[in-house]
Amino acid sequence: MTDLQSKNPDFDRVVRDSFSRQPFMAFVGAKIEDLSPGICTLTMARREELTQQHGFFHGGMVGSLLDSAAGYAAFSLYPENSTVLTVDMKVNFLNPANGTSLRATASVINVGDKIYHLKGDVYSISEGEETHCMTGVFTMMCLLGMSDAPNLGRIKGAV
């Protein structure tokens, strides 16, 4: 999809505020590199505690970064007084994530009333070389009438 329009004129501030309240993304050192309606790019630097036994970024970490990029790409299109929730994600590992940093970019490919479909890719970066390490498709749900402010109890079934 091209030329997507946000339903929230203040989407940049709203998305960045939500991202800043994610303790997990703060813990791993993820940052928003780029944000526009329907597109989000997150980056993070390598840290030893984010790797697996072979020294690559842990696959769960790579998938989590892409899931957050997809969530915020979708959220950037949502109207005020709504929030985002991942419904489904399917990722494929293409190469080990063996760089000094990661860049995850997701973009909206289909917009429904409540369901948004996205695609995304992660690149491992080392010494200026990029290696495509993950690709995926995502389904996000727009929860209308729910604030994005913290309160897990508001979502049915949340613990």
Image (cartoon, helix red, strand yellow):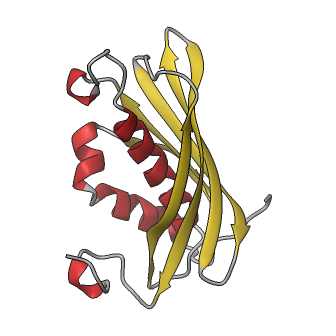
Q: Position of residue 3 (x, y in %)?
A: 78, 61
Q: Is residue 51 left or right of residue 159?
A: right
Residue 90's place in the image compared with 145, above or below, is above
Relative to 17, 73 lies left or right: right
Left or right: 155 in relation to 78: left
- Taking the view exactly as shown, the residue that stands out farthest to the bottom is 145
User: Nearest the camera: 111 or 96?
Assistant: 96
Classify the position of the N terminus by image quarter. bottom right
**Residue depicted at x 33% and y 23%:** 46
Total residue callouts: 0
| Relative depth, front residue between 8 and 87 | 87
Residue 40: x %, y % from top left = 55, 50
In front of the other: 104 or 56:
56
Please say if 71 is above or below 7: above
Toward the right, the furthest residue is 2
Measured as percent of width and height from the top left, residue 120 is found at: 61, 46
Residue at the spot 51% in from the left edge and 63% down from the top edge: 88
Residue 28, image x, y percentages: 27, 38
36 vs 38, nearest the viewer: 38
The structure residue drawn at horizontal position 55% and vertical position 81%, both measured from the top left corner, is 79
Quarter containing the C terminus? bottom left
* Residue in the image at 40% along x and 17% along y: 100
Specify the farthest residue to the top: 127
Report which quarter residue 51 is drawn in. top left
In the figure, is residue 30 to the left or right of 41?
left
Q: Is residue 151 visible?
A: no
> Can you see residue 65?
yes
